[in-house]
Image: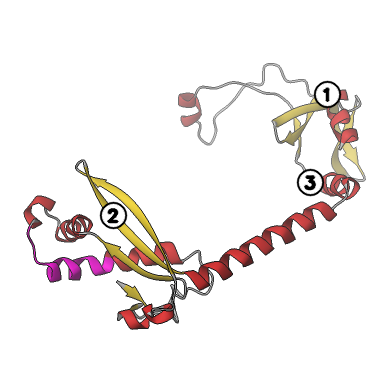
Amino acid sequence: MFFAADVSPGLCAIALDERCAIQCAAARLHQDAAGLEGASSLFLKLLSEQPTIALWHLFASGMADHNVTKSQSPQVEASGVAGGLEATSRYLEVELSLTFDGQTSQIRLLYFVDYMQRFARTHARQLEERKARACSQSPKSLSESVRASAISLDAVLDRMTLTIGECSQLEIGSVLPLTSADAGRLSLCAETVNGSVDIGTGELGVWKRQRAVKLHTPISESFAREIVEL
């Protein structure tokens, strides 16, 4: 199947071999592929058009200037592809191998070389620009960025362990005894990339007419060391 140059300037055509076409037809007709052996080429072509267009959407969606949202079919005659399949035009053929019932089949993709060269140059330039931006960030600016990022702090009164079955039975009005809870001692926890970490202890109080936690201990040495080393 050939694709119009205005909506597919890079991917020009997709070709399925007979076994792939039979598999497409069998899937659409909801029948065994063996029953379609010997079917006419025109019949198989018609039944494989929709899957081939779906493949085009899949491969072309990540390529610049390919309009996969256009409502009308991208299918055209051979002369309508990028380069017009003229003798002076250059193309790149990519062959994909699939296995059906132990037998190998091929899907062939035809790309317009001029487009692919432009695509490769643009991609390489964008990579270099990203590398340059990354290198322009000094260690100090990276450290300041990390220090300015937000983390979650939790004041925890007590912790308990329940089975999944016990958790599934919880409902409004359930009572969970806090056997190890100390109303004057709260654990202050920080959410880090390694999970929740206890960084200090404190007690619940009031500050400026609002509930607050007053620390009893400095933050943990390991946590403080990580911050200093940023």
Q: Is residue 165 left or right of residue 194?
A: left
Q: Which badge, 3 or 1, is on the more N-terminal residue?
A: 3
Given residues 162 and 88, the one toward you in this image is 88
Q: Which mark is residue 184?
A: 1
Residue hosting label 3: 150
Q: Helix or strand or loop: what does disc 2 sit on?
A: strand
SS assignment for the magenta stretch, majority:
helix
Where's residue 194, x and y in %?
70, 31
Residue 69 against residue 200 in the figure, above or below:
below
Residue hosting label 2: 106
The amino acid beneath tag 2 is Gln
Identity of the residue furthest to the top in this view? 179
Task: Tell me which residue sits at (19%, 59%) in the image.
Answer: 18
The amino acid beneath tag 3 is Ala
Q: Helix or strand or loop: what does disc 1 sit on?
A: loop
Given residues 15 and 31, the one toward you in this image is 15
Q: Which badge, 2 or 3, is on the more N-terminal residue?
A: 2
**Where, quadrant-wise, is the N terminus in this rendering?**
bottom left
Instruction: Tell which tag, 2 or 3, sits nearer the viewer.
Output: 2
- Magenta stretch: give its range: 38-50
Instruction: Tell which tag, 3 or 1, sits nearer the viewer.
Output: 3
